[in-house]
Amino acid sequence: MLKPECILAVCMIILFQSCTNDKFETDLCASVSYVETIQPIINMKCAVSGCHVSGFQPGDFTNYQVLKQKVDDGKLQLVVFDLKIMPPVNKLSDEETSIVKCWIANGAKSN
């Protein structure tokens, strides 16, 4: 026999999973633009003094092609989303993380 707290926990998980707003996420992803959305995040959080600017060995993220290469080879996703070690100081907010994930999922276009 399942304990009441186990049943409650399962019901809560089902409830929260069913309450996602897929339309909101779809709308958000459709409106993500490299120039208007991603580039400002990169400039505020990544391409700061001493990091990801011209001459920075790991990559100049002020250059779209360099950033796109890091997306294509999976390194950006690894250090930002999986390991969560970048950016080291100005961490991405949950909203910024969602926006960048949407941009990547939609092909990381230069739009």
Image (cartoon, rainbow, N blue to C red):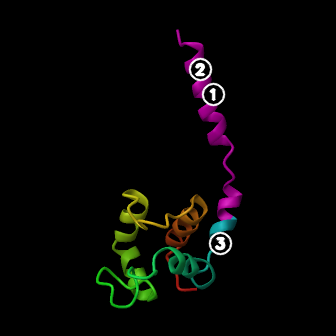
Label pair 1/2, CB-CB below 8 angstroms? yes
Figure disc tally: 3
Label 1 – label 3 distance at C-alpha:
32 Å
Q: Quadrant of residue 34?
A: bottom right
Q: Nearer the viewer, residue 60 or 108?
A: 60
Tell me if residue 15 is in the magenta stretch. Answer: yes
Q: Which mark is residue 30?
A: 3
Q: Secondary structure at mark 3?
A: helix
Answer left or right for 9 relative to 69: right
Amino acid of disc 2: Ile
Q: Position of residue 109 (x, y in %)?
A: 52, 81
Q: Quadrant of residue 39?
A: bottom right
Q: Secondary structure at mark 2?
A: helix
Q: Which residues are magenta?
A: 1-26
Tell me if residue 45 is in the magenta stretch. Answer: no
Q: Position of residue 88 (x, y in %)?
A: 41, 65
